[in-house]
């Protein structure tokens, strides 16, 4: 019996599946010829030609040139039309909102940074968000209406049962129970929100060290210490969005964190967070400790320690590696992940030297022994993850030719 239009197995659906496969190949490889697309998809030359003509007519691909320097006639090359769709991402911290716009291929076409120095701005959060977004849209030479989807990355997580931001008391203005409704009313495009460390994990899974891995933990250490959990290929957020808030984790050597909504000391954060590094360096007699934000100081000290062969710096790395492994051992013992990705400036700055020390310590503290790697996505990883998240949904919508 013949199926109705839109039923799996019908020509319309099969064409849409072939169209999406070709578009995904063009995203992955860049310019491809009709013959190459046919070989990669298993389609005949006539079918591949019809497919490309259909996608070109829909404005999804462009004919961009011809092959040269090969025997035989030159072949027409095709690529995804970058203007087929645009997505935006925001990386929110207490100091600033960093916004960017990417075209459908993933290339960043506009970026804007809006300083937000604490409560002194007096500017409502909704206006901060729209101002930051508008700055990136303008830098891209676009209008708000050109953006298909926005993803906002923040510390903490919005509780799905209350709509309130939790685990991020240091982010002023973002805790109104009506904030999400206010943002929805102010933004002309659909938007989503996600924990910042979860977005770093997404960036590493799509573009970096966790490619082809479906079970991994990402440990992030910069302004704060946190983790992201990817299980079975999917982010595990927890019942209230608080999965991975490991800064509160009880660990030996620091006080228990009580009244966690108010406390800012104790636990894994005090043992191994960025703020612990300058103090540890002083205890070991290391001089020339940088002034300024502790995350930058920690990154500088750990980078220098990884390159310096004197005993105080070696001791700093060994001690810090033990502290990191102490908290990781709990995560690894419960989750048994395939991979642990070390990310954030305070971890990546120590490079392979710090990674190897943490790996060795963890193998003595935990029964399971995942492989540790240093994250690859270094430039604005939260923002990159927000863009990748927004682009994934945008591509599903724009590339759906079955409608």
Image (cartoon, helix red, strand yellow):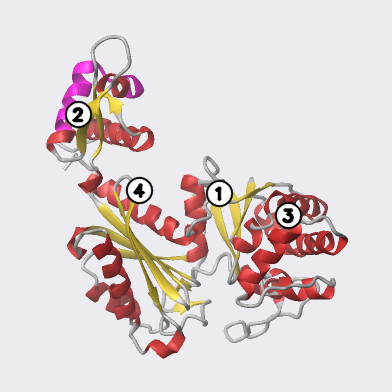
Query: Does the magenta run of residues contain 87?
Result: no
Label 1: element kind: loop
Distance from the alpha carbon under mark 1 to that under mark 3 = 15 Å
Distance from the alpha carbon under mark 1 to that under mark 4 = 17 Å
Q: Which residue is mark 1?
A: 376
Q: Position of residue 214 (x, y in %)?
A: 54, 45
Q: Position of residue 387 (x, y in %)?
A: 38, 56
Left or right of 267 in this view: 341: left
Label 2: element kind: helix
Q: Quadrant of residue 40 in the image?
A: top left
Q: Which residue is mark 3?
A: 354
Q: Nearer the viewer, residue 244 or 375?
A: 375
Q: Nearer the viewer, residue 74 or 173?
A: 74
Distance from the alpha carbon under mark 2 to that under mark 3 = 49 Å
Left or right of 312 in this view: 275: left
Residue visible at 53% across and 55% down in the picture: 378
Mark 3 closeness class: few <14, some 14–19, many ≥20 residues within 10 Å: many
Query: Does the magenta run of residues contain 42?
Result: yes
Mark 2 closeness class: few <14, some 14–19, many ≥20 residues within 10 Å: many
In the displayed structure, 157 sits above or below 123; it is: above
């Amino acid at each position: 019996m013949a199926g109705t239009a839109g039923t799996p197995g019908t020509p319309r659906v099969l064409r849409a599946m072939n169209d999406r496969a070709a578009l995904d190949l063009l995203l992955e490889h860049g310019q491809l010829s009709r013959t190459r697309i046919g070989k990669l998809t298993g389609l005949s030359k006539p079918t591949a030609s019809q497919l490309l003509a259909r996608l070109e007519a829909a404005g999804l691909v462009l004919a961009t040139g011809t092959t040269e320097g090969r025997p035989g006639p030159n072949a027409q090359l095709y690529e995804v039309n970058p203007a087929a769709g645009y997505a935006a991402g925001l990386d929110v911290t207490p100091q600033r909102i960093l916004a960017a716009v990417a075209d459908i291929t993933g290339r960043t076409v506009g970026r804007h940074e809006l300083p937000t120095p604490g409560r002194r701005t007096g500017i409502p959060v909704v206006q901060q968000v729209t101002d930051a977004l508008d700055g990136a849209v303008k830098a891209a030479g676009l209008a708000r209406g050109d953006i298909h989807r926005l993803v906002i990355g923040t510390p903490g997580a919005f509780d799905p049962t209350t709509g309130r931001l939790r685990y991020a008391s240091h982010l002023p203005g973002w805790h109104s129970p009506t904030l999400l409704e206010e943002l929805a009313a102010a933004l002309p495009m659909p938007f989503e929100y996600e924990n910042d460390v979860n977005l770093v994990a997404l960036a590493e899974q799509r573009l970096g060290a966790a490619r082809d891995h479906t079970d991994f933990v990402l440990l992030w250490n910069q302004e704060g210490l946190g983790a992201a959990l990817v299980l079975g290929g999917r982010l595990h957020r927890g019942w209230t969005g608080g999965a991975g808030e490991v800064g509160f984790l009880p660990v030996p050597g620091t006080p228990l964190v009580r009244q966690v909504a108010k406390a800012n000391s104790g636990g894994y954060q005090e043992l191994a967070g960025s703020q612990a590094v300058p103090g540890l360096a002083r205890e070991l007699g290391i001089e020339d400790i940088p002034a300024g934000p502790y995350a930058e100081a920690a990154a500088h000290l750990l980078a220098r320690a990884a390159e310096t062969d004197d005993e105080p710096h070696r001791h700093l790395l060994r001690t810090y590696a033990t502290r990191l492994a102490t908290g990781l051992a709990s995560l690894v013992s419960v989750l048994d992940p395939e991979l642990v990705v070390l990310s954030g400036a305070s971890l990546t700055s120590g490079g392979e030297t710090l990674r190897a020390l943490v790996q060795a310590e963890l193998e003595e503290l935990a029964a399971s022994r995942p492989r540790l790697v240093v994250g690859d996505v270094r430039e604005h990883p939260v923002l990159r993850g927000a863009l990748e998240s927004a682009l994934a949904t945008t591509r599903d919508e724009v590339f759906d030719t079955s409608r």
